[in-house]
């Protein structure tokens, strides 16, 4: 099936994240992933979409977050840096976004994830999309995937064939639940990527608004860059 090429964690939902060499996964996904979000006074969380739980907050994608221990550290679009435990961080985020009253909030009972605990894409699917979106810089950062799997350069939607199956990656077992529905975030600039305003329409026109897959953690453990990916029930010699 491939090997782990990159591991990403997003301390604050809808902000840019941090690249890791390894991560521990449990039932809710990567430890610390999307553990924080920007919450408005009505209790909705900042996102790239509007829904019952989420509120679209333009500009949120231009922030970045990483952890210092278990404290998120937020880098603003202008380069200013605030720790998540600083008293002024809430007011500064609100002022930068232009959304009065928002605050950086830690997850309570309901996870901040949109659909599932772990999201992954493959190099094959990125190559497939690159053929249909010439001139657009494509890598996993546009899709805020937790895992990039190296499945080679052949352009195909490799991971879509895994839906309904279980895979083993290092100590972890994942169930591939469904294709991932995309939103406007894929075309926004950030993390060294230029804006790609037509990318969401390309994905909609060519693949029904889906790209990559959502998964749940069946068995937790550690995943490392370089770990092989195998279908559960298959030997390594017969991996897809």
Image (spheres, rainbow, N blue to C red):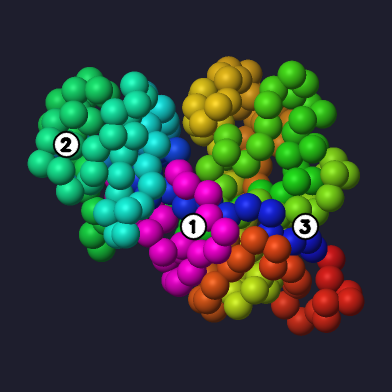
Which tag, 2 or 1, sits closer to the chain's start?
2
Give the spatial CA distance, label 2 vs label 3.
43 Å
Q: Secondary structure at mark 1?
A: loop
Viewer-closest of 155 and 109: 155
Q: Secondary structure at mark 3?
A: helix
Viewer-closest of 49 and 91: 91
Say whether residue 24 is magenta: yes
Q: Is residue 194 above or below residue 1?
A: above
Query: Does residue 223 appear in this view?
Result: yes
* Residue 77: image location, x then y, percent: 36, 24
Q: Going by the image, does 233 lie left or right of 119? A: right
Which tag, 2 or 3, sits closer to the chain's start?
2
User: What is the crowding at mark 3: few (fewer than 14 residues within 10 Å), some, or many (at least 20)?
Assistant: few
Magenta-highlighted residues: 17-37
* Residue 15: image location, x then y, percent: 40, 38
Q: Residue at coordinates 44% horizontally, 71% vertically from top-left?
A: 27
Residue under label 2, please give it: 90
Residue under label 3, please give it: 161
Q: Quadrant of the N terminus?
A: bottom right
Residue under label 1, please give it: 116
Q: Residue at coordinates 53% horizontally, 49% vertically from top-left?
A: 19
Give the spatial CA distance, label 2 vs label 1.
27 Å
| Image quadrant where residue 234 sits | bottom right
* Residue 198: image location, x then y, percent: 63, 18
Give the spatial CA distance, label 1 vs label 3.
18 Å
Q: Residue at coordinates 45% horizontally, 38% vertically from top-left?
A: 16
Q: Which residue reaches farthest left?
A: 87
Query: Which marked residue is nearer to the observer: mark 2 or mark 1?
Result: 2
Q: Going by the image, does 14 lie left or right of 162? A: left
* Residue 127: image location, x then y, percent: 79, 38
């Amino acid at each position: 099936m491939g090997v782990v090429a990159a591991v990403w964690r997003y301390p604050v939902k809808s902000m840019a994240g941090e690249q890791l060499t390894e991560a521990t996964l449990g039932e809710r996904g990567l430890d610390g992933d999307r553990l924080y979000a920007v919450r408005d006074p009505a209790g909705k969380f900042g996102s790239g979409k509007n829904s019952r739980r989420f509120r679209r907050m333009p500009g949120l994608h231009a922030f970045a977050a990483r952890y210092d221990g278990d404290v998120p550290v937020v880098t603003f679009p202008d380069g200013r840096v605030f720790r998540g435990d600083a008293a002024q961080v809430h007011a500064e985020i609100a002022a930068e976004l232009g959304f009065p009253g928002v605050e950086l909030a830690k997850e309570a009972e309901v996870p901040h994830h949109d659909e599932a605990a772990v999201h992954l894409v493959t190099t094959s699917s990125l190559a497939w999309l690159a053929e249909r979106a010439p001139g657009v810089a494509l890598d996993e950062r546009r899709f805020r995937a937790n895992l990039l799997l190296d499945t080679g350069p052949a352009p195909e939607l490799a991971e879509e064939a895994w839906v309904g199956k279980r895979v083993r990656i290092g100590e972890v077992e994942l169930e591939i639940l469904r294709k991932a529905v995309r939103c406007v975030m894929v075309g926004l600039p950030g993390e060294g990527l230029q804006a790609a305003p037509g990318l969401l329409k390309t994905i909609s026109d060519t693949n029904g608004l889906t790209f990559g897959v959502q998964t749940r953690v069946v068995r937790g453990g550690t995943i490392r860059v370089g770990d092989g990916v195998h279908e559960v029930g298959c030997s390594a010699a017969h991996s897809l």
